[in-house]
Amino acid sequence: MSELRVTGRSEDGSHLLLTDHEDKEFTLRISDNLRATINQPRLASVPTESAPTLSIKELQARLRGGAAIEDLAREANWSYEKVERFAGPILQERAYIIDLAQKIVMKKDGAREPLTFNDLIVNKLAISNVSEDSLEWNTHRREDGTWVITLNYPNREGHGSAEWIFDQNRRT
């Protein structure tokens, strides 16, 4: 029996590239069965040089920066469910920031009720018959600690978007 060593992965990530002591090349399809075998507790601690992974801290920083769970799972070679476990608190934080930004008071007239950021946007878009239910809010944190609030909405051309910078500390 010849011993094979891992030399990399195929471009599409579906096969391992292997070579033997005579430098003959082989491929091995990465199946669910292979993943399950490799992820057994006694094998999981064996370091692999060919599969770069992300630390939890880096993963969460990338999620705060707006990266998609699917992209991070593929990059880290983790299951979607594993990334999702660490994404929960970050997604909650992003939802909290959107809620906080939407509640910022934008206008205060003596005779009128205070107008929040969300009220202002909804009122402006209502003129074009855009309902509040069709608005898609998102956010990501920039390296300077401020947040980018993104709004996607339907319009005559099909799709519109807008961005604002939100400083959580100054509430602006």
Image (cartoon, helix red, strand yellow):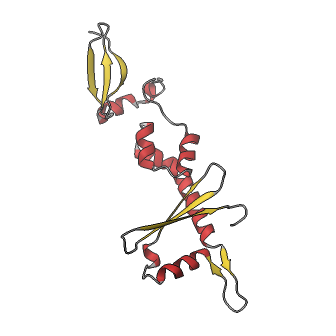
* Residue depicted at 47% across the width and 82% down the height: 126
Please determine whether, in this image, residue 59 is positioned above or below residue 14.
below
Residue 152 placed where, x, y %? 46, 67
Residue 11 placed where, x, y %? 32, 31
**Residue 5 relative to residue 48: left or right:** left
Please determine whether, in this image, residue 9 is positioned above or below residue 84.
above
Residue 153 placed where, x, y %? 44, 70
The residue sitting at the bottom extreme is: 111
* Residue depicted at 45% across the width and 50% down the height: 68
Which of these two is toward me, 89 or 115?
Answer: 115
**Residue 164 relative to residue 16: left or right:** right
Which of these two is toward me, 126 or 36?
Answer: 126
* Residue depicted at 36% across the width and 70% down the height: 158
* Residue depicted at 66% across the width and 50% down the height: 144
Please determine whether, in this image, residue 94 is positioned above or below residue 10.
below
Residue 34 placed where, x, y %? 32, 30
Quarter location, residue 171? bottom right
The residue sitting at the top extreme is: 22
Which of these two is toward me, 89 or 45?
Answer: 89
**Could you tell me which quadrant the C terminus lies in?**
bottom right
Please determine whether, in this image, residue 151 is positioned above or below residue 71.
below
Which of these two is toward me, 158 or 38?
Answer: 158
**Could you tell me which quadrant the N terminus lies in?**
top left
